[in-house]
Amino acid sequence: MPWLGLASIILAAPARAETPSLDEIWAIVQQQQEEIALLKEQLREADAQLAVADQRIEATGDYLDTLVAPPALPQTRIAGYGELHYNNLNANDSARDLDQIDFHRFVLFFGNEFTDRIRFFSELELEHSLAGDGAPGEIELEQAYIDFTLSDSYSTRAGLFLLPLGTVNETHEPTTFYGVERNSVESVIIPTTWWEAGAAMSGRYGNGLSWDVAMHSGLAIPTSGPNAFRVRSGRQKVAEALASDAAYTLRLRYSGMPGLDLGVSYQYQTDASQIGGDGLDAGQLFAANVAYNIGGLSLKGQYANWRFSGSAVEAAGADNQTGWYLEPSYRFSTSLGDWGFYTRYEDVKGARTQDQFTQNEIGLNYWPIDKVVFKFDYRQRDHDLASDVGRDFDGIDIGLGYQF
């Protein structure tokens, strides 16, 4: 109260010779009230400023929440890769010389996330730049499946998908492997790229162990003609494919040690031709692959073997088809990008005599960035049989690849 303030001032003040008059006391009281009114006004202004600051802080928080909030589903994603090849190969039979440039693959991936547990993935490919009547290329649907996440460790998928086999069948973007052309073992014996329709389940564990099991459509390998018993010619590509006999694939994989990746696959074809009584019955594929990296040094290897039963395939000597390769390499970084040097030795024994050969290869990759690669290699191929000596060749390949 103003009178109490006045009393305290009077009591605290040193004694005066004369007692203040009423006019003086009234002046002191008026001065105190003016000061109190000024303080109240300053307090109201401070409260108003604090209220505005609180509103701004709240608005800023709401805006930041919109920045860090997860995007709304569904999400659609587009990715892809491509590779341009130049091949200059000189064969013993000059009629088999090859000197050409080819945009070998143009691929687009389309995916959609319906929920955090249900996703769609697809892969559409144009081969050799041009498709249609008389054109060398094809337009192919290589993947189109729905993936279901069951838990942190388990998932399943259904539709059209790449089979879990080998080193490049599932991961074959040009920036991920050495050489302009993919290795021959995973072309002749494992017919990469190989996709089928069906259902699969996968398990992934924190110790580096994983597994995949799939039931899917099978091969329809021809039993006559120039491609008799050739595995690659048996791919139906899920285009009105015969489906009287299913196939099954199992893979075990281990990557629990730094730098190590091991894989073992088994596939069973109940009837590899889809036609009963034609002399080609069941088929079994066993494949194993290894990759080991120490710093920039790497060693990669692949082994694959087919065993077929049936009187016709056995009489043709095509009941046992096998292939393997070893590939040491070294990759290092510079201020201009990464360089990698490699050599590869392959031994292939396919159904046709032209698919029975050994091949030596040496080359380099240059990655200016991880998603772009330039490639150069030298190859020398020698066929096993004298009848195919004209197919022996040596030559160079130059390539450009990208992915995004």
Image (tube, rainbow, N blue to C red):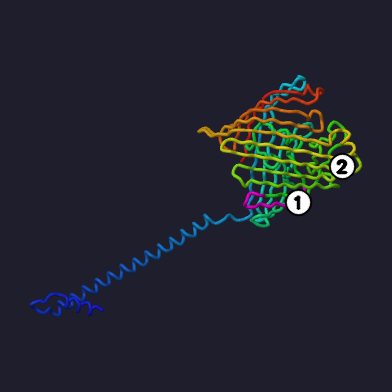
Which residue is outermost to the front? 257
In the image, 309 versus 388, the foreground residue is 309
Closer to the eye: label 2 or 1: 2
**Is residue 170 visible to us here?**
yes
Image point (67%, 41%), residue name: 171
Q: Position of residue 272 (x, y in %)?
A: 84, 42
Quick one: 109 or 237, which is closer to the camera?
Answer: 237
Kindly identify the amino acid type of the residue bearing the numbered disc 2.
Asp
Under mark 1, the amino acid is Ala
Closest to the observer: 22 or 320?
320
Query: Where 72 falls versus 348 (above or below)?
Result: below
Q: Which residues are magenta?
A: 197-209
Q: State the residue position of label 1.
A: 199
Mark 2 or 1, nearer chain start = 1
- Callout 2–callout 1 Cβ contact below 8 Å: no
Q: Quadrant of the C terminus?
A: top right
- Is residue 305 magenta-colored? no
